[in-house]
Amino acid sequence: MKKIAVGSNWIMHMDFESMRSSEIGIYLEDTLEKVPAMEEKIRGFQKKFGVDLMGVSNLTIFGSGERHRGIGILEGGVDSSIVTEVTRSREYIQESKLGETPIFSTERGRRPIAFSVLEKGKIVFGPDSDYVYQGIEIANGKGSGSISHPILNSLNGLLDDPGYLLFANVKEAMKVADLDQRVQSMIEKVDAAGVVIGDDADGLKIIGLVQTDSSETSEPMENMIRGGLAMMDMKISNNSSMMKLLKGYRVTRKDRMIRVEIELSTSFIIERIKKEMKKSV
């Protein structure tokens, strides 16, 4: 939590090292190593842009809930000298400095973006230089960190080595978020929620936590989740090519907290990847 800004109401963390060490990740890595053309493309990308796609360690993105405004920190696999050189060669990218720190920005694309390349193999990005500077302080260990949330604490302990974590303090985020009325009405009964995904035994496990705003709203919310999962199970069961994907699911509720566990077949996912890769070849 020391790597998250104060006032962050949503967090997404992707641990690529954990993903690569998973059963699916190991299979993909071994397979890609046997495809010379893919290996060549990965090395070419690294040489040209300074980013080793197979060496990226993790990506963390967080924000308060304001639309299109947040901070991202990418760690590992970054050659700062190459990335900086390539960036400076793009005429549509402007460079400025905050102290001794160079910050690049561009208006090109759907919305403005700013970023900075740090010497320790990190890239910090955000909507403008102020956000990037705040991200640099955090990435360098100078931030004060964010106060953790009970659901986030629970998520961190649900799986031994999750590859993906998403958390949202919905109640606080809605105070600053500009949401569509239909979306707002759907989530206004939710206090906070989160999900983790990772290897567990011989399957890929997804665990979600939803904390409602009261005990009275938790039961209808649980029933809605159960109904959605039952429909998904029925659709998969009626599809002969997908029926082995879902190994099982479970929904439990205690007071305001709803826990959802979904287990997918790792072997089935790998078989599907094999088929798709053969098609592309």
Image (cartoon, rainbow, N blue to C red):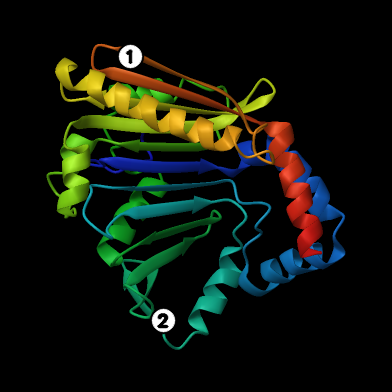
Q: Please tell me which residue lies in front, 250 or 207.
A: 250
> For numbered disc 2, what is the local secondary structure?
loop
Extreme front residue here? 238
The residue type indicated by label 1 comes to Arg
State how far apart marks 1 and 2 are (Cα): 51 Å
Circle 2 residue: 93
Extreme top residue here? 254
Which sits earlier in the primary sequence, circle 1 or circle 2? 2
In the image, is 64 to the left or to the right of 71?
left
Q: Please tell me which residue lies in front, 255 or 111.
A: 255
- The mark lying in front, picked from 1 and 2, is 1
- Give the answer, above or below, for where 91 lies relative to 208: below
- Give the answer, above or below, for where 280 lies relative to 54: below
Q: Position of residue 53 (x, y in %)?
A: 65, 57
The answer to whether residue 44 is visible is: yes
Q: Position of residue 242 (x, y in %)?
A: 65, 39
Query: Which residue: 28% across, 60% down?
Result: 68
Report the disc number at residue 253.
1
Q: Position of residue 72 (x, y in %)?
A: 40, 53
In the image, is 12 to the left or to the right of 221?
right
